[in-house]
Image (tube, rainbow, N blue to C red):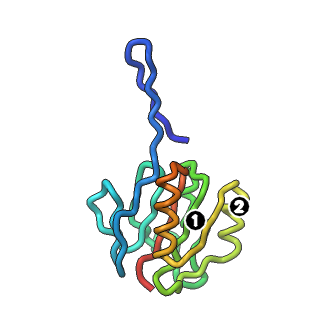
Amino acid sequence: MLSIKYPFSRLWFHFVMSSPEIASLSWGQMKVKGCSTTYKDCKVWPGGSRTWDWRETGTNHSPGVQPADLEEVVKKGVKTVVIGRGMSEALQVPASTVDYLKKNGIDVLVLQTEKAVAEYNALAAQGVRVGGVFHSTC
């Protein structure tokens, strides 16, 4: 859990980073609330987001999302990870990736991207420490 404590007088303020809302999704474009970047594919976690660059891990539609794609999100202390497989669900998610998350005590949802974004936003609005990776095209 990421928290920052600031001493003021004899009081302590405790801030916990929340998962940012995904503000918009269309073919090939995603916007995260509080971020000026437009993403094609993105990673989100409590307190932040960034481009999901498949070249970093050699990800392709098949075999699909690798545990290495999720390590950064897992390290942010999430309790749930949502994986958006694309608008037509072309992006695969192997059992080994789901197993990696479960072995780390993390709930996982694998959905078509529009449904994944809706579920992610609902969890974030409930205060769940949720993260995700989302593919916004095929």
Picture layout, residue 133 above or below residue 35: below
Q: Quadrant of residue 92?
A: bottom right
For badge 1, the amino acid type reads: Ala
When the figure is inspected, residue 45 is found, relative to residue 134, above or below; the finding is above
User: Which part of the image, by quadrant, shows the N terminus?
Assistant: top right
Q: Which residue is mark 2?
A: 102
Q: Could you tell me residue 69's position as x and y percent?
A: 54, 66
Residue at 55% x, 65% y: name it: 82
Q: Residues within 10 Å of mark 2 (few under 14, many from 20)?
A: few
- Residue 43 picture quarter: bottom left
Q: Give the mark nearest the N terminus, 2 or 1.
A: 1
What whole-number distance in Å separates the C-alpha atoms at marks 2 and 1?
15 Å
**What amino acid is labelled 2 in the image?**
Lys
Q: Left or right? Give the position of 98 relative to 6.
A: right
Q: Quadrant of residue 34?
A: bottom left
How far across and how far down the image is residue 115, in percent?
A: 50, 74
The local secondary structure at tag 1 comes to helix
On-image quarter of the C terminus? bottom left
Query: Where does residue 19 sit, x and y in percent of width and height?
Result: 46, 52
Around disc 1, counting alpha carbons within 10 Å, would you say few (fewer than 14), some (14 to 19), or many (20 or more)? some
Q: Residue 68: which numbered mark, if any?
A: 1
Q: Give the total of numbered labels.
A: 2
**For this view, does 28 lie left or right of residue 81?**
left
Figure check: 16 above or below 132? above
* Residue 135 locus on image (x, y percent): 46, 75
> What element does badge 2 sit on?
helix
Between residue 72 and residue 42, name the one nearer to us. Answer: 42
Cβ atoms under marks 2 and 1 closer than 8 Å: no
User: Which mark is drawn over residue 22?
Assistant: none
| Numbered disc in front, either 2 or 1 | 2
Residue 98, placed above or below residue 1: below
